[in-house]
Image: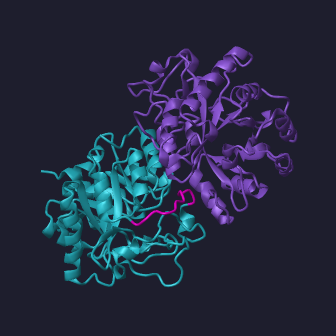
Chain colours: A purple, B cyan
Amino acid sequence: MQHPQVEAFAGQEGLIRVVGHRGARGLMPENTLEGFGFTLACGVRLLEFDVVMTRDNVPVITHNHRLTGSIVRDREGAWLRGAEPKVSDLDWADLSQLDVGGLDGSSAYGQRFPDQAFLSGVGIPRLRDLCRLVAQPEYEDVHLMLEIKSDPDKMKDAQVRAGIVAAVVAELRKMGLTERTLMHSFDWNLLAECSAQAPEMPTSYLTQLPENADDIGEDSATNASPELTVDNPPDLICAAGGALWCPYYLDVTAQAVARAQTLGLRVAVWTVNEVAEIDRMIALGVDAIITDFPGRVQHRLLAHGLGWAG
Amino acid sequence: MQHPQVEAFAGQEGLIRVVGHRGARGLMPENTLEGFGFTLACGVRLLEFDVVMTRDNVPVITHNHRLTGSIVRDREGAWLRGAEPKVSDLDWADLSQLDVGGLDGSSAYGQRFPDQAFLSGVGIPRLRDLCRLVAQPEYEDVHLMLEIKSDPDKMKDAQVRAGIVAAVVAELRKMGLTERTLMHSFDWNLLAECSAQAPEMPTSYLTQLPENADDIGEDSATNASPELTVDNPPDLICAAGGALWCPYYLDVTAQAVARAQTLGLRVAVWTVNEVAEIDRMIALGVDAIITDFPGRVQHRLLAHGLGWAG
């Protein structure tokens, strides 16, 4: 029997899914409750986001392991300057003082999102805060693509890995959300640990070929995986027991998508923002498109006679 | 003494105001509660919108006098085709069946807003519905720029004009919002009627020179005004008793902005969406920028060391 959360991310006849990347990063501050709320208000019910652990073992929703001046302000409203502290060296009490409501438009990262709303007084959410939001009855059709970010300094430590997974799974179980969540990572060891601890939660394998890894101002993808080529991920992920393959959009070929779907994998492509690339993904027949601009993808799907929910 | 709602739209040292045009038309369906809610969530507290009267005298929030297939779907979800009914020939009960949650991306109008979220089951709001929203305590700092659209077929009828103004003013007075609302129109006769009926509500004079009037897929601006040139609106509006001048952005010159401000008028420019034009308006020192993309204007203001609220 198929897991319900895999069905939620699966394309159908006439339908490609839209997944909001960190909420809707093009328009609202990433990985914030405000951004998730907006994405849901757009009629997009699939949310992708990133989880990192604090020193005191609180799963929080933020992308980079280090707090960066391009998105983080202190309680006086000043951008963080100088040394960038690691999230894992701070307690939740420290993190909760910070403001992630606005991008620094003068930074290289900020220049990528010139239309993002600039808010103030917006905190880093805990995983618990998002769970509380989507546990409300009006959001019972919402599903989560929860990326666990492996700390590059600790990726080889099986005990650290087990601890992160245990904390995340405990939070989801407490809120009754394990059947609405996919575990999503570049770290194949971590996904194996997820499957061991929470077999009710299918796994989603992120990949990015090194030659295409050039996202400005972000932690780069660290594939803890077998050596990857353009063609080999579907077979490797199938053998590893994965349910979804999530390739970087520049890596994707028609052959590889077809191979993945033949093997029974679902294919969700990230992060697809330009019209030409959205159209190319639609032509490839992927199952889901992960995007910073949900409205743009909705309109491209409609232009091709497709929908995104059903 | 200055009216508080004029102060709310007035620039200050270090500050140019941001006004959400029909909510945030670039990103959310125009003139909907969903769009207004998003604009408020962006930290933009000044809302521009359009009011038209139904046959049964209900002020509703919609731009065009005729329902157009590019934004209106019937209750089966089909775009309106063929004859475009006039709002003033329909009762509120009829209008309330329609869905304005999504643009038809294949229409000329729809192609102007490729990033707008596509929603379903979103109704045309009544003025009353928006008043209820902003009457909530959390929105006590929100101010309204209420455009009354004069029906071109009835613009010469003083009785019709008096009736429209009376209905709108009654609604605002009932909700205690007259001191948070500007009356805004291209129809100078209508604005004079507003001042007569509701002297507590200052007036905002929209202008567009005929040579620049080319908004695709919209009712064109019908200036019921003295003959306009590039230079004469400030003196004419001052003489008419206006508080704001709202010129079309392509019409605006440094001389005219300076003249308006010398006369004590506030200048709010519409609808400014492109970065180069936003920057030009900032350089001109206008009081307020009316935009379909509030986040984009926020970031241009920040880039110039300016804010938008205070």
Residue B290 appears anywhere in the view: no
Q: Is residue B185 left or right of residue A127?
A: left
Residue at 19%, 60% (x, y): give it.
Answer: B174
Reply above or below: B128 against B135.
Answer: below
Q: Is residue A309 left or right of residue A229?
A: left
Residue at 40%, 28% (x, y): give it.
Answer: A77
Where is residue A150? Give x, y as percent. Answer: 68, 24
Reply above or below: B155 against A65.
Answer: below
Where is residue B128? Give x, y as percent. Answer: 29, 62
Residue B277 or A13: which is nearer the viewer? A13
Task: State yes or no: residue B130 in magenta.
Answer: no
Which region is colored magenta?
B114-124
The chief SS type of the magenta part is loop
Where is residue B227? Give x, y as percent. Answer: 29, 76
Figure quadrant of the C terminus of chain A: bottom right
Residue B259 or A150: which is nearer the viewer? A150
Where is residue B19? Give x, y as percent. Answer: 36, 53
